[in-house]
Amino acid sequence: MKPAGEDRAGRWARLNERREWDLVVVGGGATGLGVALDAAARGFSVALVESHDFAQGTSSRATKLVHGGVRYLAQGNVHLVREALHERAAMLANAPHVAQPLPFVMPGYHWWERGFYGTGLKLYDALAGSRGLGATEWLGSAGVRTLLPGVQPRGLWGGVKYWDGQFDDARYALLLARTAAARGAVVLNHCAATELLRRDGRVHGVVVRDAETGAETTLSARCVVNAAGVWVDMLRDLDRDAGAPPRSPLVAPSQGVHLVVDRRFLPGTHALLVPKTTDGRVLFAVPWLGKTILGTTDTPRADLAREPRPFPAEVDFILREAGRYLQQAPRREDVRSVWVGLRPLVRHDGDAGDTKALSREHTVLVGGSGLVTVTGGKWTTYRAMAEDVLERCMAHGLLPRRPAGATTRLQLVGAAPGRSLALPPGEHLYGSEAALLRTLPGADRWLWRDGDGGLSEAMVRFAARHEAARSIEDVLARRSRLLFLDAAEAARLAPAVATILADELERELDPAPFEALAASYQRLP
């Protein structure tokens, strides 16, 4: 049975059909997809290309939180917090099956912590206003132990409960891509922008290459947006005259490490937040898809590896600090998967020695050539970033004026009330498309089972037919999140997924590269 809907060849053909696009977006992470969706929703003709897979870089490696930024409030950045709280409400409303409220508890081990942090979180509630998810509550030690089974009881004075959100970041990105496509955009993964087209010093399009076939085509455009995340400087460097020196880097990458352990270390549905560890960093323990995520770090990194690996000190830090706040301290052998994301932090003075001091806000630059570059920011504010990008495009005459607000209440594909994201993954993550999923072959053949969820043969077929999956990694890392939950189990499934994908894509797939990748997610330095 052939895949339903427009296939990859059809999308490639549509790239070639249009003589000129209003907008070409380079980069298929949260920011680029947000720009593509907003522009398509306003009626612009839009093409987006991504050199690898949608959200394969930073946008699938977040701490899975949709949040206003409690620590930014502590830094006095009220503007960023207010904007993020507004955007948090939009994210949760527009895709409730993959983005939901999440209760947090801050345990206090000093007499002053409960009052101090509770007062700050009441201000957080006030900034959220009518968009708040629940009132902050002061808790005694018994209340903390009830909500956080597994918390270290020794020395516990009490705590504070407050609300933020969480999501499945990669699946949310896929929904942005699919919703943009439903609005007329052509979005193509595994298709790299290799050259900028320039005429009289102005950018007027890109050359793109299909990674699967090697075919190239030229996309002429009124406006080109560089939304390549930590890799934006690579495209910016193409936007210069022959012989001109390379541009000064805009981004100073910082990496965040996450360790995944079983839920027995922190049962229940509440997340744990330590706002200030022994070295001043933040520690999270977040229930997510049947596991617990421990993180994160903020470490400068000089390279731009596609698969960055943790430094030994980062792993030691997370395990040591988790052991201080959990009754049962996780050990290295308890880690099911370790993954690292690179944050695109914006340089303002050329000094990237301390990435914790660099801006978490986004930056939009319009070069003299007309190339629009956006970087920085965070997942929660992707929609506001997209509006800002399009405003700058219009202000510079690259696009005609059209009103903002098209995506504020634009529900994404499949939007429907969902089950808790603390539960193992399953059909509930497909929202209103669960019925369509059930019509595909293999709906009752489970490749991996976790409670009443897991990964079925039909889910692999759905990934190929409806979610642009082109590889075993696309399926097991981002359509299913199994690589991020249990890397050894993901490696075990690689041959079975390869067989199903071969039937769908009509070409053979070698499991070995994915098995090697999964081995690296199991390995701690």
Image: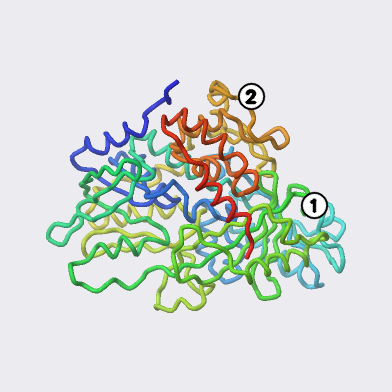
Report if residue 135 is visible in the image: no
Which kind of residue does numbered mark 1 sit on?
A: Leu
Q: Position of residue 359 (x, y in %)?
A: 47, 69
Residue where numbered disc 1 is placed: 147
Vertical position of residue 197 compared to residue 430: above or below: below
Q: Quadrant of the N terminus?
A: top left
Tell me which label, 2 or 1, sits earlier in the chain: 1
Q: Nearer the viewer, residue 322 or 511?
A: 511
Side of 508 where 257 appears, left or right: right
Task: Categorize mark 2 by other alpha carbons within 10 Å: few (<14), some (14-19), many (20+).
Answer: few
Q: Position of residue 244 (x, y in %)?
A: 21, 72
Q: Position of residue 211 (x, y in %)?
A: 34, 45
Task: Categorize mark 1 by other alpha carbons within 10 Å: few (<14), some (14-19), many (20+).
Answer: many
Side of 281 where 504 appears, left or right: left
Residue where numbered disc 2 is placed: 444
Q: Tell me the residue at 86%/62% (across/down).
A: 153
Q: Nearer the viewer, residue 358 or 390?
A: 358
Report if residue 360 is visible in the image: yes
Query: Label 1 near label 2: C-beta < 8 Å?
Result: no
Q: Secondary structure beneath disc 1?
A: helix
Q: Quadrant of the C terminus?
A: bottom right
